[in-house]
Amino acid sequence: MTLGVSPPPQGGAPPAWGGPALAAHAAHLLVADDNKVNRLLLTRSLELQGHRVSSAENGRVALEMLRRESFDLLLLDMEMPEMNGFQVLEQLSADLQLRDLPVIVTSSLEGITHIVRCIELGAEDYLPKPVNPVLLRARIGSSLEKKRLRDQQKALVRRFATSEVAQDLQQSGFALGGRRISATVMFCDIRGFTALVESQTPEAVIELLNTWYTLMFEAINSHGGVVNQMIGDGLMALFGAPLPLADAPGSAVSAALEMIELIELFNIDQVTAGKPSIRIGVGIATGDMVAGYTGTQSRATYTCIGDAVNLAARLEAHTKLAQRTILIDDLTRTALNAAVPVEALGDVQLKGKAAAVPVFAVLTTG
Amino acid sequence: MNSSAIDHATFAELQEAAGADFVIELVDTFIAEAPQMLAELRAARTAGNAEQFRRAAHSLKSNSLTFGAMALGALARELEVKGLDRDPAADAQALTALDTAYAQAAAALKTLCHG
């Protein structure tokens, strides 16, 4: 049930509830209260503070509205029929989309234990009824400000981490250390990058790198992979971490093939524009590794440590010598669909490896 | 009629904060809703439904305090905190007192709003 915005009071002195807030601070708020007098009064006071307000007469209706529309904050009564405030708080904390919604409990419940329980269930603040207008204004301002900061933080995490890592962080929180997983690792870099840098202006190189990264991200992400490191002219990508992937080795090889295709298309444009074309090398290996956050409490990166990681890096370096574009290890090849043409290169002694390992090249059409 | 049923300072604050015209609307809503809360309390007493009893008392308390109906709010709070009495006669007595306090509060509120 949504109440319309009531018109400002006619005549008389302007109400002390503060007049309209600055437009920048106006928010969309939801008031959940089964008592009509409370609902009308809260709605009124919030509107007078310049916010846009909807209201719900019980917890069930409130949850429905929260899942349907976007709100900046919920003012929640505890005593309600159908679904009470405690149940609403429980449902909110279990809902990935809604767990960060700030909730201010407005209640005249007797006893401190109820207040403690609200806070434990994730409520941001508690305002006793009848609600003091000055306190209400202050608490709402502070809750909205905290939400803005959290939203900013989330946006930052998304920019500097992948959305998968961001999601993993949001769900499990940040902790240094890792867990053992099975995944596929890919390393990729631009062949002859040093010569390229010498022949181009720095601006042209940056532009080239940005385009290259865009194409590689596109190919990797569309096959369920995650770019977790960018190293100058190279990158490291994970398939099957931090989130599991049904066919990590197959996805990594498909991504590599698409990367080659995209580079070929890119090269056609480059040559037409009289600019240098580029070539890449890709190394892929599969195995058990430890995935997690390494670094310090204040600065850390999500990465994977394990033999397969080293192997993928060595295979990528070996593409130059082998004169093949995509090299994979035995575990990746074993998991591959028979339709993917592969050439066995025999056992190769890779740098940093005690024994020679079997190496395979994935055949590309180009 | 007993205008001391309403704490005038609380009521004036409410008018100042929400606007006098809006408070008239709010009082009308309260007077329309409160008899149902009182009826619910009686029904809960008859049915021996402790949860319904506590909730109706809670609602009535909350609204009373909003308007400065202190005596009514205190009686409702007593019922909320104590819950259903083992002795139905004790509750019946309390409910009669509550009805009286409500009648006085409602009359005072009407006077304050409409002169």
Image (cartoon, rainbow, N blue to C red):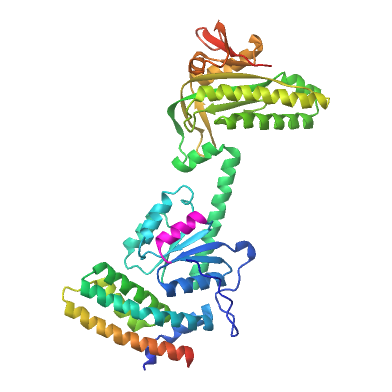
Q: Dividing the picture into quarters, in which one does residue B58 lie? A: bottom left
Please say whether residue A60 is one of the residues in the magenta stretch: yes
Q: Position of residue A186 (x, y in %)?
A: 57, 23
Q: Dividing the picture into quarters, in which one does residue A6 lie? A: bottom right
Foreground pick, A99 / A273: A273
x 48%, y 57%: residue? A66
A343 relative to B97 in the view: left or right: right
**Where is the N terminus of chain B found, in terms of image quarters?**
bottom left
Q: Position of residue A10 (x, y in %)?
A: 59, 83
The reply to whether residue A321 is visible in this rendering is yes
Decide: is A254 above or below B105.
above
Decide: is A168 above or below B21.
above
Foreground pick, B76 / A128: B76
> What is the magenta segment's predominant secondary structure?
helix
* Circle count: 0
Q: Which residues are magenta?
A: A57-68
x 36%, y 58%: residue? A86
Judged from this view, the residue extending furthest toward the front is A339
The reply to whether residue A132 is visible in this rendering is no
A362 relative to A278 in the view: left or right: left
Judged from this view, the residue extending furthest toward the left is B87
x 34%, y 85%: residue? B102
Please say whether residue A24 is one of the residues in the magenta stretch: no
x 38%, y 53%: residue? A90
Decide: is B82 above or below B107.
above
Q: Position of residue B53 (x, y in %)?
A: 27, 72
Foreground pick, B39 / A97: B39
Q: Position of residue A41 (x, y in %)?
A: 48, 74
Judged from this view, the residue extending furthest toward the top is A346
Foreground pick, A17 / A41: A41
Q: Dividing the picture into quarters, in which one does residue A8 lie? A: bottom right
